[in-house]
Image (cartoon, coloured by chain):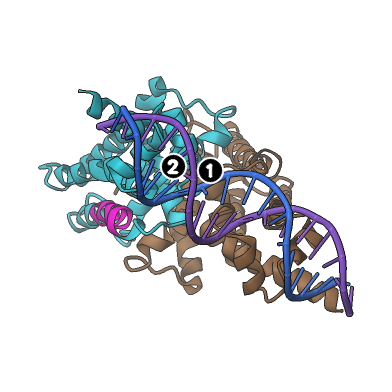
Chain colours: A cyan, B brown, C blue, D purple
Amino acid sequence: MVKKDYRNNLIDTATRLFAERGLKGVGIRELSKAAEVSISMISYHFGGKEGLYSLVLQEQFACFEQIETIRELEAAPLEKIEAYIRWSIRRHREYPYLMRFYTSELTNPTPYFATIVDPAIKKVIRILMETVEEGIRIRHFRQGLSCGYGAGMIGMVNYYFLSTLATREIVSHSPERDEELIRHYMDLFGKGILT
Amino acid sequence: MVKKDYRNNLIDTATRLFAERGLKGVGIRELSKAAEVSISMISYHFGGKEGLYSLVLQEQFACFEQIETIRELEAAPLEKIEAYIRWSIRRHREYPYLMRFYTSELTNPTPYFATIVDPAIKKVIRILMETVEEGIRIRHFRQGLSCGYGAGMIGMVNYYFLSTLATREIVSHSPERDEELIRHYMDLFGKGILT
DNA sequence: GTCTATATTGCGATAGAC
DNA sequence: GTCTATCGCAATATAGAC
């Protein structure tokens, strides 16, 4: 079906371009040329540039629904933390532009931050904090810890992907290293760095 | 001196507006109106909008020079890590818009990323990795750790400030909590979370 | 140094043909 | 559904008066 090809073509191209240069950094002329369709297709299919952007954003953040399965997991808190790390890394690999939208919306929010991005971030942070809280309560984790440590783990993983542009010459970001990365995060988070 | 007032006025206004909406998100009309000067002042003093932006960026990242004092510190690796955390938090408090420029340039880089932002980030990461490496070498830190753990610490601290917009209703970001925050990061990084 | 007025270019959106 | 051509507006930069 021709219609669907053109539509998907536009969505794919827009995802890449918006991720790389932001909503304001991409014009509909360049967008339609890159997608090899005419400029009027953007208004026709998506009601304008902003409509296309919000659709791309929705697609990118839809996967945050899956975090609920981690909350409902019948598992020890530390296993839930590992499940989060695995889910998070898988998510970044599956949606290579996700971190760009995530941080771009956090620093230069568009009107869609409040409805799409903010709830997704809050949901993940709340679940991680809950998990750490539970770990403290049932004495798997040390007493007197702050449940904010959960957010520390989110920060470590996200920064690994966020900083790629500056660190790829220093640290390998190959997917083949992902398992090693998970072990390292769990090791550091669990036991700390000291002898 | 009138000249300097107008110039500084423009720089201050531009810092706030560029931080909040990005280079492309702010026009020189709005900028000059907010700074209460005429539009032509931007070209006159800074050679155009981009010139003003690059000056703001230089100002924001100039403080990264100070990281050298941590490298040269005569102190144990763990103390250097704490010195980094203190320096980083102080930096975020002194330059409240720094994290916005930092992440905005990482996700939607402008032509100034390569000369201003990239070297600053690389310098900090290298020093943290060196410090962890040294800690492992002199057996203050556990053997078999990756020196990439240093970057994990950068990620935790930066994410705390990056995520403010989404987490301020969940976690307090008050400067009065900073000392507690430093203790928590050192505690987690040093001993981990397990009993 | 600072202003107003204007030149020029580029933007997003759409009318109308097919 | 898709195209081309064009409208109206906002962008940056600058000429020229003071």
Q: Is B14 drawn above or below residue A54 in the view shown?
A: below
Can the viewer see residue B35 in this picture?
A: yes
Label 2 environment density (alpha carbons within 10 Å; few <14, some 14–19, many ≥20): many
Question: Percent x, y for residue B61?
Answer: 68, 53
Element at label 1: loop
Magenta span contains residue A123: yes
Label 2 is found on which chain of the structure? A
Q: Are marks 2 and 1 in contact (CB under 8 Å)?
A: yes
Q: Is B110 drawn above or below residue A127 in the view shown?
A: above
Q: Residue at x 46, y 72 (%)?
A: B174
Identify the disc placed on residue A100: 2
Q: Mark 2: which amino acid?
A: Arg
Element at label 2: helix
Question: Percent x, y for residue A91?
Answer: 30, 35
* Viewer-proximal residue among B183 and B173: B173
* Viewer-proximal residue among A128 and A6: A6
Q: Mark 1: which amino acid?
A: Asn
Dot 1 corresponds to which residue?
A: B108
- Furthest toward the top, the residue is A176
Q: Is the residue at mark 2 from the same chain as the one at mark 1?
A: no
Question: Percent x, y for residue B106?
Answer: 54, 43
Question: Percent x, y for residue A63?
Answer: 24, 40
Q: Residue at x 31, y 48 (%)?
A: A47
Label 1 is found on which chain of the structure? B
Q: Quadrant of the N terminus of chain A?
A: top left
The stretch in magenta equals: A115-128
